[in-house]
Image (cartoon, rainbow, N blue to C red):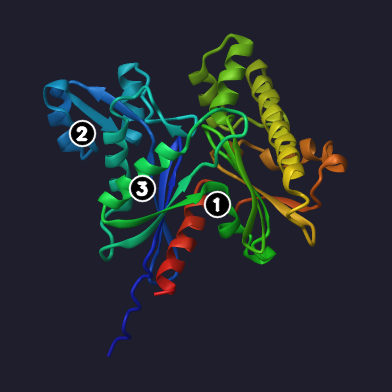
Amino acid sequence: MPPKKTPAPLGVGLDIGTMNIVSARRQSGGSVDTNRVRDAFLDLNQSAKEMLKLSGVNYIDQGEDGIVVVGDAAMEMANVFGREARRPLSQGLISAGEMDALDVLGVMIKSVLGEPKKAGEACYFSVPAAPVDADRDVVYHQGVFDRIVSECGYTAYASNEAMAIIYAEAAGDGFSGLGISFGSGMCNLALAVSGVEGLCFSVARGGDWIDAGAAKAIGSTQSRICALKEQGVDLMDPQGREAEALALYYKSLITYCIDQTASEFGKIKDRFSLPRPIPIIVSGGTSLAKNFLPFFEQVFEKKRKRFPIEISEIRHASDPLNAVARGLLIQAMQEHDED
């Protein structure tokens, strides 16, 4: 008689980023499956509908107003038609100027989540912390995604993006560390000791800020700079004006995050003690540039003596694009372990 298969654990993690939306699930064998969709969309007229049906591309039919293609297909078709794909999130939050954003996000999230394994299955989704350097409200952002996830049949739980990195990557450190998620819209940072959050904030700068600044500095376009970055610019050996501009803005972003961490920690150091040195764990799509880790270390070493937190090491997340989703998955599974 064949051995009885162990059912896959319940719970799903959902990382909602400016560039990508990623879900993570644990399978019965113990492996983690991730599912990703590019956070982009493109409006087309109704004449493209039959072609899209044949290709199996996700789209929203808006009747006389045309159709909206979502995900990676939107980026590909934007290139074909010489257009810019639109993005439902801007600077880490729902884009106020995109009227179609909510419908698009609903389709995207449903496509990566799929159906729950049982009614009310736990889904932890990422939300950014309130930025310390901009007047942006995350309450509406969180509420919208709570509704969308709930409408997909899940019990929705909001969780901080950077804390998810601690859950995913710092088990060997007793869930203690400084997690930094370098995203497209903003950077999220969280400091934790033994899984207890002591500091959590974001800065309103990220990969898009790097692209825009570098493009403006040398008279290029943001899309061209972004393409160069995604092709794998070497931060330790930038070749050409565009690459040099990227490296300078990467340095500025890292310096800014380190300085903001020191400033924010200064506000709580009398209420939150660090019994031992902790690691810095960097993650996120913007951290995928070639030699990002030694570049980060080089910038940090110039700040180490005045940095108010003792750092044991600096390391890259083992899976930078999926680390947040994996950390959220761990939290979601705990909801069912307690049942």
Residue furthest to the bottom in view is 1
**Residue type at tag 1:** Asp
Residue 190 visible (yes or no): no
From the viewer's perspective, tell me whether residue 315 is left or right of residue 332: right
Q: Earlier in the sequence, mark 2 or mark 3?
A: 2
- Marking on residue 195: none
Which residue is the site of mark 3?
Answer: 146
Q: Are marks 1 and 2 in contact (CB under 8 Å)?
A: no
Where residue 90 appears, x then y in whole percent?
45, 28
Q: For the residue labelled by badge 3, is the local secondary structure a helix, a strand or a loop? A: helix
Q: Earlier in the sequence, mark 1 or mark 2?
A: 2
- Marking on residue 60: 2
Pick whichever, 67 or 148, lies toward us: 148
Q: Residue at x 28, y 41 (%)?
A: 106
Cα–Cα gap, marks 1 and 3: 26 Å
Where residue 318 appears, x then y in whole percent?
59, 54
**Alpha-carbon neighbours of circle 1 within 10 Å: few (<14), some, or many (≥20)?**
few
Residue furthest to the right in view is 305
Quick check: 250 above or below 278?
Answer: above
Pick whichever, 218 or 2, lies toward us: 218
Q: For the residue labelled by badge 1, is the local secondary structure a helix, a strand or a loop? A: loop
Which residue is the site of mark 1?
Answer: 319
Residue 2 visible (yes or no): yes
From the viewer's perspective, tell me whether residue 156 is left or right of residue 236: left
**Residue type at tag 2:** Ile
**Alpha-carbon neighbours of circle 2 within 10 Å: few (<14), some, or many (≥20)?**
some
**Residue type at tag 3:** Asp
Q: Earlier in the sequence, mark 1 or mark 3?
A: 3
Where residue 155 appears, x then y in whole percent?
33, 58
Q: Residue at x 51, y 50 (%)?
A: 324
